[in-house]
Image (cartoon, rainbow, N blue to C red):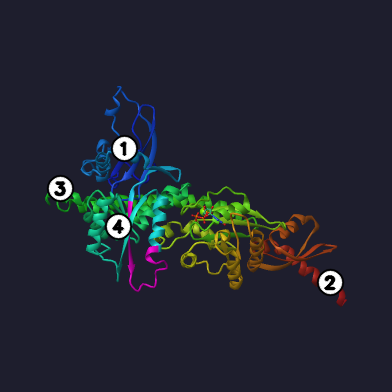
Amino acid sequence: MSSFLFPSSSPIPKPHWRGNSIPRPNRPITLSLLHGNSYSWRLSCKLSLDFEESVEEDEIPQFLDFSAEEEEEPSLEKETVSAPTTTLMQRKKKKGDEESLEDRFKLRNGKEVFEEKAYLVGVERKGDGECLFDIEESLEELEQLADTAGLMVVGSTYQKLASPNPRTYIGSGKVSEIKSAINALDVETVIFDDELSPGQLRNLEKAFGGDVRVCDRTALILDIFNQRAATHEAALQVALAQMEYQLPRLTRMWTHLERQSGGQVKGMGEKQIEVDKRILRTQIGVLKKELESVRKHRKQYRSRRVAIPVPVVSLVGYTNAGKSTLLNQLTGANVLAENRLFATLDPTTRRVQMHNGKEFLLTDTVGFIQKLPTTLVAAFRATLEEISESSLLVHVVDISHPLANQQIEAVEKVMSELDVSSIPKLVVWNKVDRVDDPHKIKLEAEEHGDVICISALTGEGLDKFCNAVHEKLKDSMVWVEALLPFDKGDLLSTIHKVGMVKETEYTENGTLVRAHVPLRFAQLLKPMRHLVKEASYAKKGEIES
Ligand SMILES: Nc1nc2c(ncn2[C@@H]2O[C@H](COP(=O)(O)OP(=O)(O)OP(=O)(O)O)[C@@H](O)[C@H]2O)c(=O)[nH]1
Ligand SMILES: [Mg+2]
């Protein structure tokens, strides 16, 4: 566990342990520490249990179930036992369905997670032209997100409203309807398609009863990012985004104090909330400092890369569009590419060598999604800054997706927030092997003019893609004439690799090159460009005399 998330002295989390299987001697068991009130926090660790005495099979508890009470905790903490712990046990006993419960532990993102039953809820805003996806499409995507997070979606509903209800997001009738569905379908988590305010979250939890976890799209995405974070920097960024999300939502945690004491300690809960918030703010500060130092290191690495005059091309696009598959195809890299959302969080850069000997660096990075949480965009800004330093942006589109147009718009919306409008762009329609009528799609692409059709999976169109990249890179190159002395043969071969050579001429003082080269490289060639001027002045002088 990352110690910055839940230091043992912090009263913020309500740790709640769940074991994944029936404990038996010498059999490894995975314990998951779940946060009681939010879906956002989870830690898993594997351990083996030693039984001190032999016990009969039927005496062995069917599921390990620890609450924070068993640990040395401050007394305030002891009073807050997470409700879902008992729910899971009761539910299991109630159903008597031991095996099916064990079956619900699934491997997700390399981690074992308990596949909770989830119910999805959305609101369609009447007359809202802002929304790119209609409500059913948005809920479908939410289902994919839930699946990626390791949840089992058992139902969904939505309501058309002029604007979401400020108290409960949905109307009271809908709340009752969902309550019935919770009972009928044995729902453990209700996920809302929009970010809920702290008040809405609290009221909904109250309305559904303590057993049910209520979370929103943002918490779900943060949870996926948390599961996916593979590097230290990504983990820090996600933890920061989670804490920023959590900060205004701390309010509900201590309200039980007032309830339990019949109001005698009124105000105590509020005091504790302030303490919690202060602790969380301190942790946020520590995280930010740690992130800064990690970033400093990455910057150093990047500046070393900048010294290499190879143009950088960044792949951007909606999550699952095929960016990593394209990088893998072109470079033989081994970036995880799979049919789940947010497979990639960290930027990966590889060198692409084209058939004609030209080279460029290709960077794959985190995918976008509609309603991307602002806390995440802010936390990942540094990672996304890599994009703003590229010579070319390649927007990868999954053209086989029924919502390709909406996805394009969603990507453009995020890009407009990133201040990259000055960088040349190339649009690539990927997965042409999956469309019903590839011929029609290719004709459409031709009509658009600036679109390349490819299949990153089969390799179709990749040569055309590389040529288009090279042509586009010319936009970010500058025209130079340089006289390279004969002992600078290495520079000449670099110009051939990264630039576009129009002509070379061998003179008695060296090779005269006329070419388009990346701006950074043009600066490196400055002394040799002066040589051209000097040579032409000298020539002019000779003619005149
Ligand atoms: N049929 C087909 N499938 C593809 C193609 N390109 C990618 N895929 C599949 O689409 C899924 C997503 O591919 P990724 O490369 O992981 O997508 P990504 O854009 O990197 O996704 P994120 O990292 O989540 O942003 C994988 O199952 C790929 O095999 C293609 O050209 N044709
Ligand atoms: Mg990827």
Label 2 vs label 4: CA separation?
Answer: 74 Å
Which residue is rendered at x = 16% and y = 51% of the image? 258
Label 3 C-beta lies within 8 Å of the nearest ligand 1 atom: no
Question: From the viewer's perspective, is the residue at label 2 or at label 4 nearer?
Answer: 4
Label 4 C-beta lies within 8 Å of the nearest ligand 1 atom: no
Label annotation for residue 539: 2
- Assess disc 3: are there few (<14), some (14-19) or many (≥20) residues with their C-alpha within 10 Å of its C-alpha: few
Q: Name the residue tied to disc 1.
A: 98
The reply to whether discs 2 and 3 touch (Cβ–Cβ < 8 Å) is: no
Label 1 vs label 4: CA separation?
Answer: 39 Å
Q: Name the residue tied to disc 3.
A: 260
Say left or right for 479 vs 3: right
**Residue 152 against residue 436 in the figure, above or below:** above
Q: Amino acid at mark 4?
A: Pro
Label 1 C-beta lies within 8 Å of the nearest ligand 1 atom: no
In terms of depth relative to the viewer, which is nearer, 234 or 108?
108
Give how far across and how far down residue 146 sits, in percent.
39, 53
Q: Over which residues does the magenta segment extend?
A: 118-136
Q: Name the residue tied to disc 4.
A: 248
Label 3 vs label 4: CA separation?
Answer: 23 Å
- Element under label 3? helix
